[in-house]
Structure formats: C-alpha cells, structure tokens
Amino acid sequence: MQSFCISLTLVALALGLGSASAATLPTSDAPSVFSSDPRSGPTSGDDDLGGLQFNPVTPPAPIALSEGSNEVTPCSLGSPELNECIRGLIQAFAPKLKYQGVPEYNMGAIDPYFYKRGIFRYTNDGIQGGLLIKNMEIYGISQLQVNSVAANFTENGFIIKLGVELPQLKAGGHFKADVKFGGLRLVPKGPFNITIDNVKATILTDGHIEQLPSGQQRLSLHRLNANVNIGDAKVVANGIFSDRNLNAMILNLVNENLPEITRVGIPATREQWAPILIAHINEFFAKVPIEKFLV
C-alpha cells in the first residue's frame, strides 16, 4: 500500500507547478497557515478539504504563454483573473516537462519522474512493517489537467488549493518489505508495476517566497495535504509469496480494493509522504525564477 500511496502522491509534484507559478510576493518566514496538527489543514471556509467537488476540465487560459514559444506573460496579483491565469500557466507548462523540461526557466523534466530510494514504516492495529522502494519511475505526470485554482496571498505567505485530474499514471520499480501481524512475519521483495486510471485530486498547500541574494525569488512550500480519488487501478508484484497461486490471490484482493485503500491510506500515511514530496517540490523549484511568473 505504501508504494501505491507514494506513486499517487508524486502526482502532486505537478501541483507544485501551480504553487510556484502563483507565488511571488510574500517573502517572510511566517508560521504555516495549516493547523499545528500535520494531519489537518486550514479549518476556515473554502480551505477545508471536506466535500470535494470535481468540476469538468475547461480549456486552459490563453494568457499564460505566447503561442509557439515558452515566453511567459506573468500573472498579476492585482488582477481579478489571477486564479485563471495561474491555472493557465500550470496547464501550459505541464506538457512541456516531459523528457526535456524547460531549460530557459531551469525546470527539469518530471515525466518520467525517477524516485531513487525511500523507506516507509507503518504501525497500527497490531500491524508493524517497513517498506523499501527503490529505482521507481513514474510516467504520466505531464498529462495533468487543472480544473480549478483558488489562491490567497498575504504579506506573510500564500495558500493555494488546486483541483486536478490525471488520465493515467504508471509506475514501476523494486520493493522489499518486512511486515509483522499477529504471529506472522512476511519479508517479500521483487519488482512491481502499478497502473492507475482516472486520478482526481484536491491539493492544499502553503508556503512563502524566499528572496535570494541574487535578487531572484524561489518557492518554499511548508505543508501539503491531498485528497485523492481513483478509478481503475492494477498492481503487479512478484515475490509477495513464493507460491505463485497465493501471490496472485493476494494481488487480486488488493486490486479489488485499491480505491478504498487509496482513500484511507493516503491520509493515514501523510506524515511520511508529505515531507518527502515537499522536499522534491522545493528542490525542483530551487533555481526557477518565480518572479517571472507573478508580478
């Protein structure tokens, strides 16, 4: 389950594009707008993640990029069309981040996205375990479709809520686990592949913009929360059990329940995946001149 959650939450790397494209003004190290409890987000108004709405995808704003080039028309904080402008920037740049990225803005490729190594631990209801994921490649992030953007900027920081869809994500790599429940211990390992269709997510993130000595600005996210729904999904993994029939039976059980596993598992494991994801997003934007995207 943990590997599945990590591949899904890396979808939000693309959401970092939305956060970065929008953020330009605030530069202080003010406290996060999120609750002190890392499992909860802001509790007021539209910043609550409850009651998700997934609206149909609408055409991207035509104001983001000059046609036929990567030249940016910046979004203005004072514009009543700010949210739509930000959405247009995300929508315009996401497909360009496949294979080559956008070197003129120091944006590296995120499709495929390579995740070298991570260890995740889980303890709950009598189950203890650890999972090592390594050499995982994720395909499909550049197909991001942005449904909605709600951005709020203050003197001390920003908060952005994004509604997105992805038609399909594919991931593959290697895993090794050590799981104990009751008197049983399992130590499976081997290759795995995941295919996920129709991902719908609402992402809530906050942060500030850091002023660099060079005069440039860079994005710094503080926290991130995600509510994710999926359509069809399939996991293929060898090595859960040495017996091939038992291995297939367990995989069938997992695949039948993946939507529910995702719905419950992503929030339950947020304390583990969110810091990793934030670090990846901040690393991606470390050299991106955010001042070119928002004025």
Image (cartoon, grey):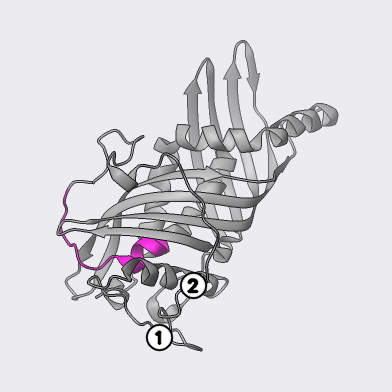
**Closest to the observer, 211 or 239:** 211
Q: Identify the mark at residue 71; answer none if there is no mark.
A: 1
Task: Tell me where residue 238 sits by quadrant.
Answer: top right
Does label 1 or label 2 sit earlier along the sequence? 2
Percent position of residue 162, x then y: 42, 56
The residue lying toward the viewer, choosing from 29 and 116, is: 29
Residue 221: which disc?
Answer: none
Amino acid at dot 1: Glu
> For the view shown, which residue lies furthest in the right direction?
245
**Which secondary structure lies at badge 1?**
loop
x 38%, y 77%: residue:
105
Which is nearer the eye, 198 or 103? Answer: 198
Q: Position of residue 87 (x, y in %)?
A: 42, 67
150 w.r.t. 97: above or below: above
- SS of the residue at dot 2? loop
Q: Circle 2 sits on which residue?
A: 60
- Which is nearer the eye, 230 or 57? 57
Residue 131 visible at all: yes
Q: Which residues are magenta?
A: 16-30
Left or right position of 256 against 69: right
Residue 293 at x, y percent in the picture: 32, 75
Q: CA distance from mark 1 to mark 2?
A: 16 Å
25 in the magenta segment: yes
Q: Is residue 147 above or below residue 8?
A: below
> Is 169 displayed left or right of 110 in the figure?
right
Residue 295 location, quadrant: bottom left
